[in-house]
Image (spheres, coloured by chain):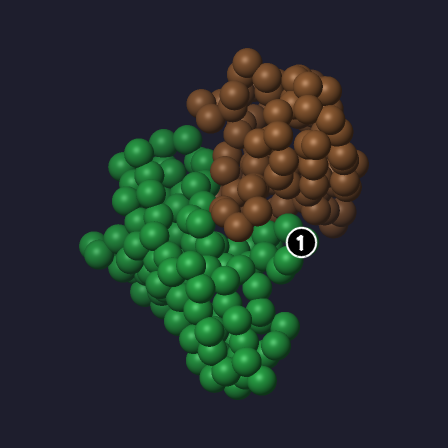
Chain colours: A brown, B green
Amino acid sequence: EAGVAQSPRYKIIEKRQSVAFWCNPISGHATLYWYQQILGQGPKLLIQFQNNGVVDDSQLPKDRFSAERLKGVDSTLKIQPAKLEDSAVYLCASSLAGDGYTFGSGTRLTVV
Amino acid sequence: GQSLEQPSEVTAVEGAIVQINCTYQTSGFYGLSWYQQHDGGAPTFLSYNALDGLEETGRFSSFLSRSDSYGYLLLQELQMKDSASYFCAVRDRRDDKIIFGKGTRLHILP
């Protein structure tokens, strides 16, 4: 089966600019997650979708981050405006209930 | 809330056995997972324990003790390609989300 697709693979932007990441989960996976992984740390959950509804966004900095999952398939994560501390790898993952996650390759964001 | 503790680094010799421990605190424990992540790569799923005991998958085994809130990942016959970061993660029963530890960097010496 095809894996979780993410784009772009790398992105460099200046602080205060905006950026968007895209994720296409494994077909049939109802649950989709966005994680932020800062260098040397474990992935931190930003938002969890079940189909096109938000299950948990308690750790999403909502003043600058937004995410949507239209039609319960693809998802986009947006940062506006970006800060230096947003430099990280943004990982998308999907799962069937009760299984392990499958992660995409991630988007490495550098904010300068 | 949830928290996980695992060593930040472990060093072992090629061909040897290494154990990476993980202790956790969570209010709605459902299971303990392990993920491997190579530099520049995405985490990949290794194993999942929902019940006490040992799960074996090839050279990798994972153990869980729910009463002790403790688990470990055991890697046997270490190979250089096993050099990576290993994350334990707890699955929360209430909302099916997974919270990751900070990871253990495994260094393998020839």
* Number of marks present in the image shown: 1
Residue A98, horizontal then vertical, whole percent: 48, 44
Q: Residue at x 38, y 60 (%)?
A: B7
Residue furthest to the top in view is A63
Based on the displayed image, in which of its 4 quarters is residue A23 positioned?
A: top right
Q: Residue at x 44, y 36 (%)?
A: B96
Against A20, residue B93 (above or below) is below
Residue furthest to the left in view is B67
Against A28, residue B20 (above or below) is below
Residue nearest the observer in this picture, B110 or A24: B110
Chain for disc number 1: B
Amino acid identity at mark 1: Gly
Residue nearest the observer in this picture, B8 or A106: B8
Q: Is residue B83 left or right of residue B3?
A: right
Residue A62, horizontal then vertical, whole percent: 53, 16
Q: Secondary structure at mark 1?
A: loop
Q: Is residue B80 left or right of residue B77?
A: right
Is residue A36 in sight in this rendering?
Answer: yes
User: Crowding at label 1, few (<14), some or many (≥20) Cα neighbours within 10 Å?
Assistant: some
Q: Which residue corresponds to mark 1?
A: B41
Based on the displayed image, in which of its 4 quarters is residue A76 positioned?
A: top right
Residue B50, horizontal then vertical, whole percent: 37, 52
Is residue B58 in sight in this rendering?
Answer: no
Residue nearest the observer in this picture, A92 or A101: A92
Based on the displayed image, in which of its 4 quarters is residue B18 positioned?
A: bottom left
Q: Residue at x 70, y 32 (%)?
A: A112
Q: Residue at x 72, y 20 (%)?
A: A17
